Amino acid sequence: MDIIRKEKADIVILQVKLSRATLKEADEFKKFLLNDINSGKKKILVDLSPCEFIDSTFLGALVISQKKISEYGGDIRLVAAHSAVRSMFELTRINKVFEIFLSVDEALKSFA
C-alpha cells in the first residue's frame, strides 16, 4: 500500500496515495494506523486528498482506529478534498466522528 508517513512536531501525517481506498487496502491501512497508536502517538492526520473513492471497509478501519486512539486521549483528523469522498462522509455520518478539513495546513492548525 502506498502511504507516505511524516511527522511534524508531535503529529503523524499519513498521506494515502490511492485513488480508490477499498477493502483490498483496508486491513493493511488499519495495521499501519494501529502501529502508530500503540506506539503512543496521540495526534494523527490522515490525508485522503488523493482519494476519489472510499468504501465502507476503509471507513471502518478509520472508525476502529479513532476508537482506539480515543482510549489514549488522542485524535485522528482527516483531510478530504474530493467532493465524492466528502459526500460519502456525510452520507455515512463519518463527519460526526471525525474533524474533516480541505487541506493539510488547515488540519495541522486545528491540533494547536
Image (spheres, rainbow, N blue to C red):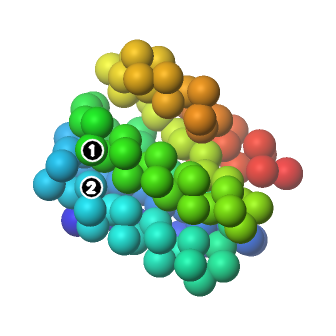
Give the residue at x 47% y 18%. Answer: 90
> How many C-alpha atoms fall within 10 Å of the one at disc 1: few (<14), some, or many (≥20)?
some
Q: Is residue 89 left or right of residue 68?
A: left
Mark 2–mark 1 CB contact (< 8 Å): yes
Q: Is residue 33 left or right of residue 13?
A: left
Mark 2, residue position: 26
Give the residue at x 47% y 70%. Answer: 34
Horizontal and vertical percent position of residue 45: 58, 54
Q: CA distance from mark 2 to mark 1?
A: 6 Å
Choose between 62 and 105: the one closer to the eye.
62
* Quadrant occupied by the N terminus: bottom left
Q: Secondary structure at mark 1?
A: helix
Horizontal and vertical percent position of residue 20: 20, 41
Q: Is residue 45 left or right of residue 75?
A: left
Choose between 102 and 100: the one closer to the eye.
100
Inspect the image, locate mark 2, and give the three-letter code of the amino acid beneath it.
Answer: Ala
Q: Is residue 42 above or below residue 16?
A: below
Residue 57 is tagged as: 1
Q: Is residue 87 above or below residue 44?
A: above
